[in-house]
Image: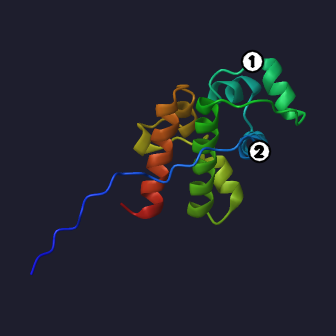
Amino acid sequence: MLVEIPRTVAEPHNPEITPVEAQAAARAVINLFARWELTDEESRQLLGGISPRTLARWKKGDIGRIDRDLATRLSLLLGIHKALRYLFADPGNAYAWVKKPNADLGGKRALDVLLDGSIFALERVRAYLDAERGGW
């Protein structure tokens, strides 16, 4: 016999990133950019166009308030890093991947796609890596 399951209101588990977590993510991304050997201009562009002064403060460990857009960018960048570390046994290869041409990205480097500056570009690379990692 079929029994109807009552509908419930959708309440997805979507906790906000706390300020402490956002600051930790910012420190991690600054270290990641050093491993990717990015210029300050590239770093600022990936972070949504933050000012040179803000980037300089971040590099010194002085990280202020992070808005939702920037927290989302940090999350996507760390997701890209995580996926690369899963895909490559050698960390050096994972860090170098962003600057190597990729046929699946139209012959562009992942960095070229990321430097589009939009959150959608970050999501595109993240989704690509997650698909590669998951074997979709």
Q: Earlier in the sequence, mark 1 or mark 2?
A: 2
**Which residue reaches farthest bottom?**
1
- Disc number lying in front (1 or 2): 2
The residue to which callout 1 is attached is 51
> Could you tell whether 110 is left or right of 94 in the image?
left
The residue located at (70%, 59%) in the rendering is: 91
Amino acid type for the residue under numbered disc 2: Val
Q: Position of residue 114 (x, y in %)?
A: 55, 33
Other-residue count near label 1 (Cα within 10 Å), few / some / many at <14 / 14–19 / ≥20? few
Quarter containing the C terminus: bottom left
Other-residue count near label 2 (Cα within 10 Å), few / some / many at <14 / 14–19 / ≥20? few
The residue located at (68%, 27%) in the rendering is: 42
CA gap, disc 1 and disc 2: 21 Å
| Placement of 94 over or under 103, stated as above or below | below
Q: Nearer the viewer, residue 90 or 72?
A: 72
Quarter containing the N terminus: bottom left
**Which residue reaches farthest right?**
60
Q: Nearer the viewer, residue 131 or 110?
A: 131
Is residue 70 in sight in this rendering? yes
Q: Position of residue 22 (x, y in %)?
A: 71, 41
Q: Nearer the viewer, residue 120 or 98?
A: 120
Is residue 35 in sight in this rendering? no
Amino acid type for the residue under numbered disc 1: Ser
Describe the element under mark 1 as helix, strand or loop: loop
- Image mark for residue 20: 2
The residue located at (52%, 37%) in the rendering is: 122
Q: Nearer the viewer, residue 63 or 99?
A: 63
